[in-house]
Amino acid sequence: MKRFIKMQQLAIIVVLAVILLGLSYHHIVSAKQTMAPQVTSTTKSKPKSTQKTTTQKATVQKKTIDWRAPSEKKAYPDLKQHPHVWLDVSQGKQRVYVKDGNTVLYTMYASTGMNNTTPNGTFTIEAERGKSFFNKSLNEGANYWTSWSGHGVYLFHSVPTDTAGNYNVTEAEKLGHKASHGCVRLTIADAQWINTYIPYGTKVVVHN
């Protein structure tokens, strides 16, 4: 009988030991899970380039033409030293070149006619010239005009003026681009110089 009781006690001890071992194992596993580092996404971000890109657009500065002043900083040519001067009008470059032979003495900003209204060809400075005019049909005028074809039809003249004789700034700022009705627009100073100094009969060549 005592032996049977001892066997029961031993069995109880074994069961308790197993239970205790089970609890201990569960505790250890839980602790390991709690202490384990959390794994997150390891997608690597590309390092930022420290080099400056070479494809940045260059800043384009639009050249502002002073439509009141001479086109160049230097003095106008002395025609006494250049008796064979002539005027080369480039519609492609929107420039008037004062030349002696093939030598460019002076370069002027210009605006020739829109829609091919300025004729190409070889012409001469005509007798007609004046200080100012106003065209009612175009509602536009100009100063320092000098005829080179049609006896008052095609002129060198300043940037446009309005009915009151004031300069039309919007139109004046188009200098250097095709903008006229057929005449050749110039800065005020350039138009005045041609009107004052370029003699009757001077050759004028207009081309693209």
Image (tube, helix red, strand yellow):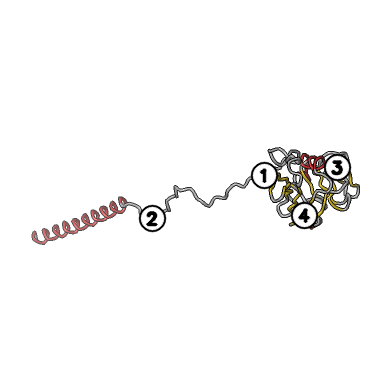
| First of labels 1, 4 by sequence position | 1
The residue pinned by badge 4 equals 206
The residue sitting at 75% across, 44% down in the picture is 173
Q: Secondary structure at mark 3?
A: loop
Please name which of the two marks, 4 or 2, marks the residue nearer to the observer: 4
The residue pinned by badge 2 equals 42
Q: CA distance from mark 4 to mark 2?
A: 72 Å
The residue sitting at 76% across, 49% down in the picture is 87
The residue pinned by badge 1 equals 63
Residue type marked 2 = Thr
Answer yes or no: do the residues labelled 2 and 1 have beta carbons within 8 Å?
A: no
Q: Secondary structure at mark 1?
A: loop
> Where residue 189 appears, x then y in whole percent?
77, 39
Q: Secondary structure at mark 2?
A: loop
The residue lying toward the viewer, choosing from 45 and 54, is: 54
> Where residue 120 appears, x then y in whole percent?
79, 57
| First of labels 1, 3 by sequence position | 1
Please name which of the two marks, 3 or 4, marks the residue nearer to the observer: 4
| First of labels 2, 1 by sequence position | 2
The quarter of the rendered structure image containing the C terminus is bottom right
